[in-house]
Image (cartoon, coloured by chain):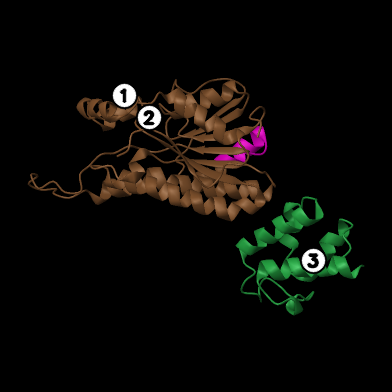
């Protein structure tokens, strides 16, 4: 893991969900985050795909309901976060 | 998007305008799924055509139809929502003894056939595209009447709704690479136009049109092909009206 990769990921999540970077923890989830709705989820998908240059599958998109789950999926695509 | 080999759903594809659009896309190499409440000889035949008799405002029927299309042709790349009915009826008619206002029943029917149908089918196709990661396009049919055509309260309202709905879709679905746009024809020389409007009214409209005629259905079909092929057009309405402004 490099700090730069993790920082970039944190910046991206914070920007799209409009939350402070300090709140971007693995436990952060859709249900408990008012700004993480279906629209921002799609923006998040598009931003991740643009940043890391691969396409998420429909199953992955449905699974991504916490920051920790997003990180796991990104790691499965060899993204070091 | 290259049209060749793509699956395109044409709602209202057996109608006088929809059948020309379906035939045009078929000639460009698409596989066509026609959804219409009636299927007749105007539907183009062939192995690349699937014609299903469906009321596209009926959600259950739409779900079943889409399953059939995907089972036959695979993923859907484009939707052309041109199902609908033209209807003229004044808001009030004080010369009538009994029915002096626009009937609510016809209002409901016109909103359902022109706006609800596009919403129901569009939502289901968008969900299919998102789930299957298809960077597709949703094309809704507006009309020059969206600007407010006297004598067409319900139809004009439905078409204005189409344009607003299309803008929303483009913004919601754009991040996934799914485009949404509307096509707003002026008055097109089709049997349904002749049925809904008098000969005198159509002649007057042609006279007021800078190009001095009604549109040919093929001119609308070419706009549909352009909307599918151009990957950077979304969230807008393409007006094809010969310069006529209502």
Q: Chain of mark 3?
A: A
| Position above or below: A37 against B48 | below
Residue B242: mark:
2
Segment tinted magenta in the rendering: B65-76
Mark 3 secondary-structure assignment: helix
Q: Quadrant of the N terminus of chain A?
A: bottom right
Q: Identify the residue at horizontal 33%, vertical 28% (top origin).
A: B210
Do the residues bearing badges 1 and 2 touch, measured as CB atoms within 8 Å?
Answer: yes
Mark 2 secondary-structure assignment: loop
Q: Which chain is brown?
A: B
Residue on which disc 3 sits: A9
Q: Identify the residue at horizontal 46%, vertical 45% (top origin).
A: B118
Instruction: Give how far apart the Cα atoms at labels 2 and 3 are.
Output: 51 Å
Image position of A48 (left or right of B127) = right
Regarding residue A12, the answer to whether it shows in the image is yes
The local crowd at label 3, few if under 14, some if 14 to 19, many if 20 or more residues have their Cα within 10 Å, is many
Q: Quadrant of the C terminus of chain A?
A: bottom right
Image position of B239 (left or right of B47) = left
* Both marks 1 and 2 on one chain: yes
Q: Position of residue B115 (x, y in %)?
A: 41, 47
Residue B72 in magenta? yes
Looking at the picture, tell me which residue is in the foreground, B45 or B225: B225
Of labels 2 and 3, the one closer to you: 2
State the hue of chain A: green
Q: Identify the residue at horizontal 68%, vertical 75% (top origin).
A: A19
Residue B212: mark:
1
């Amino acid at each position: 893991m490099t700090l730069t990769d993790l920082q970039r990921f944190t910046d991206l999540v914070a920007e799209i969900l409009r939350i402070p970077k300090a709140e971007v923890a693995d436990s952060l989830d859709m249900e408990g985050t008012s700004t993480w709705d279906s629209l921002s989820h799609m923006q998040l998908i598009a931003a991740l795909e643009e940043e890391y240059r691969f396409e998420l599958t429909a199953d992955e998109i449905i699974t991504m309901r916490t920051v920790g789950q997003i990180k796991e999926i990104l790691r499965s695509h060899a993204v070091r976060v | 998007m290259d049209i060749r080999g793509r699956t395109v759903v044409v709602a209202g594809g057996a109608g006088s305008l929809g059948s020309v659009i379906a035939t045009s896309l078929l000639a460009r190499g698409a596989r066509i799924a026609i959804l219409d409440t009636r299927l007749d000889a105007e539907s183009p035949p062939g192995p690349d055509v699937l014609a299903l008799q469906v009321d596209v405002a009926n959600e259950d029927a739409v779900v079943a139809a889409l399953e059939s299309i995907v089972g036959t042709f695979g993923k859907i790349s484009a939707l052309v929502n041109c199902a609908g009915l033209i209807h003229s009826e004044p808001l009030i008619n004080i010369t009538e003894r009994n029915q002096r206002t626009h009937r609510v029943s016809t209002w409901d029917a016109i909103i359902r056939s022109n706006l609800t149908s596009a919403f129901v089918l569009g939502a289901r196709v968008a969900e299919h595209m998102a789930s299957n990661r298809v960077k597709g396009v949703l094309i809704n049919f507006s009309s020059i009447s969206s600007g407010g055509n006297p004598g067409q309260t319900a139809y004009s309202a439905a078409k204005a709704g189409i344009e607003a709905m299309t803008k929303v879709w483009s913004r919601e679905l754009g991040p996934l690479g799914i485009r949404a746009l509307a096509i707003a024809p002026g008055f097109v020389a089709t049997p349904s136009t002749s049925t809904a409007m008098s000969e005198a009214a159509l002649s007057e409209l042609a006279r007021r049109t800078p190009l001095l005629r009604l549109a040919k259905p093929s001119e609308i079909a070419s706009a549909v092909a352009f909307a599918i092929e151009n990957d950077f057009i979304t969230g807008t309405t393409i007006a094809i009206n010969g310069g006529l402004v209502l």
